[in-house]
Image (cartoon, helix red, strand yellow):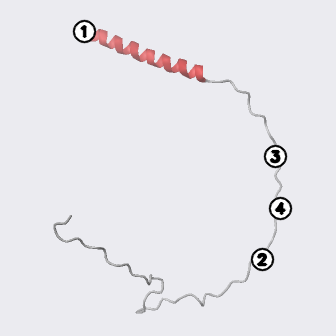
Amino acid sequence: MRSGLWKRRLAAVAGGSAITAMVVLTASCAKEEAPAPEETTTTTTTTTTTTAPPVEPTEKAPRLDPGQPNPFSPTVIAPPAPTAPPGDN
């Protein structure tokens, strides 16, 4: 029972030392800097009204008819992937 007590004490001292070291390093690395000067900015907003250009009809767009090919599908068909002879992996 006495052998476990010194292990606990050693662990407590090591942990306390680690915490103390972190606090000291943090405090030593902190710098006091002057606060940034406050700046005031004035924002002006200008509103302009414009008219949209006239809308063009979509009559030029391809139509999707049932039973017909899809006009949005690609026309280029890629060649098939090359195959290796069996056992040549």
**x and y, in percent, of residue 45 in the image:** 82, 58
**x and y, in percent, of residue 72 in the image:** 48, 83
The amino acid beneath tag 4 is Thr
| Mark toward the start of the polypeptide (3 vs 2) | 3
Q: Say whether marks 1 and 3 touch (CB < 8 Å).
A: no
Determine the CA span between mark 4 and mark 3.
16 Å
Q: Quadrant of the C terminus?
A: bottom left
The residue identified by callout 3 is: 41
Element carrying mark 3: loop
Q: Say whether marks 3 and 2 touch (CB < 8 Å).
A: no
The residue identified by callout 1 is: 3
73 lies above or below 11: below
- Choose top left, top right, bottom left or bottom right for residue 84: bottom left
The residue identified by callout 4 is: 46
The amino acid beneath tag 2 is Thr
Element carrying mark 1: helix
2 relative to 12 in the view: left or right: left
Within 10 Å of disc 2 (Cα), the crowding (few <14, some 14-19, many 20+) is few
Q: Say whether marks 4 and 3 touch (CB < 8 Å).
A: no
